[in-house]
Image (cartoon, grey):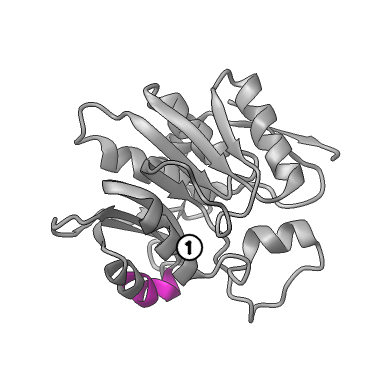
């Protein structure tokens, strides 16, 4: 998959590849994945495009507020021959005309207390004051169909808040996976699969370890190989 990215500004990182693999792992139990897919804060479009490539019966919708990224999402969908319905607007303010079967997102999750970059493009894409966690979860619940699926990743330090907010919004966690830089290091990222009005018990998937010594772990190498993405930097 060819993906154009900004020469200067926010670029996708490995979190998106790992989230894509997590989504695929959890969708394996379903025989017929179809319907409406929404990617919140699509950036260059990578997450939604990877999922739409994998599951041909899904209709891809992407929501992106920034002009440059809206352009890149559209361009990358076109060059990869994937049909796209783009909402070039704020996720929070947009009144969606339909409900969705699956919602996915690699949202901005760094707390605003962290020292922020002066680059406005990167700031919007990274920091959660631009999409607060409580609003992110509550709005998603409202646009999901009954038993709709919600996949996202977030700073593991906020897992307690995530659990509380999901429960408050009738979203039941069905699966979690934790990313660790190395096997003896603390987790830095949690990947979450929640389902609207579900009563299922929670599964904890085996941890994803990024590095084995100084090299990428075999699992991470498998994920990169499966994604098969090639980035091209462009001036915008």
From the top left corner, tell me how far across and down residue 173 is, in percent.
25, 60
Image side of residue 150 versus residue 230, left or right: left
At x 18%, y 59%, the residue is: 202
At x 50%, y 44%, the residue is: 39
Instruction: Compare residues 73 and 95 and report the one nearer the observer.
Output: 95
From the top left corner, tell me how far across and down residue 127 is, in percent.
63, 67
Helix, strand or loop for disc 1: helix
From the top left corner, tell me how far across and down residue 131 is, in percent.
57, 65
From the top left corner, tell me how far across and down residue 133 is, in percent.
48, 69
Q: Which residues are magenta?
A: 156-163
Please, is residue 233 above or below residue 41 in the view? above
Image side of residue 205 versus residue 162, left or right: left
Res 24 → quadrant:
top left
At x 46%, y 25%, the residue is: 53
Q: Callout 1 environment at 10 Å: few (<14), some (14 to 19), or many (20+)? A: some
Residue 189 visible, this orientation: no
Residue 19 visible, this orientation: yes
Image side of residue 198 versus residue 19, left or right: left
Disc 1 target residue:
136
Magenta highlight on residue 69: no
At x 63%, y 62%, the residue is: 126
Instruction: Compare residues 37 and 202 and report the one nearer the observer.
Output: 37
Quarter placement of the C terminus: top right
Res 130 → quadrant:
bottom right
């Amino acid at each position: 998959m060819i993906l154009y990215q900004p020469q200067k500004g926010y670029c996708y990182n490995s979190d998106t590849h790992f989230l894509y693999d997590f989504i695929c792992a959890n969708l394996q139990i379903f025989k017929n994945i179809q319907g409406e897919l929404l990617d919140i804060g699509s950036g260059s479009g990578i997450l939604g495009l990877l999922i739409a490539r994998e599951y041909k019966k899904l209709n891809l919708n992407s929501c992106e507020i920034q002009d440059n990224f809206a352009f890149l999402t559209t361009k990358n969908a076109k060059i990869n021959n994937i049909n796209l319905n783009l909402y070039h607007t704020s996720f929070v303010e947009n009144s969606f005309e339909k409900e969705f079967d699956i919602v996915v997102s690699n949202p901005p999750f760094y707390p605003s207390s962290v020292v922020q970059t002066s680059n406005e493009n990167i700031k919007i894409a990274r920091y959660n004051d631009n999409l607060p966690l409580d609003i992110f979860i509550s709005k998603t619940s409202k646009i999901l169909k009954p038993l709709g699926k919600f996949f996202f990743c977030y700073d593991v330090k906020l897992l307690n808040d995530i659990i509380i907010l999901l429960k408050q919004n009738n979203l039941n966690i069905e699966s979690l996976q934790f990313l660790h830089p190395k096997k003896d290091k603390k987790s830095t990222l949690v990947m979450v699969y929640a389902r609207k009005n579900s009563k299922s018990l929670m599964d904890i998937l085996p941890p994803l370890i990024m590095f084995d010594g100084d090299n990428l772990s075999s699992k991470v190498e498998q994920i990169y190989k499966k994604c098969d993405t090639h980035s091209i930097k462009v001036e915008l």
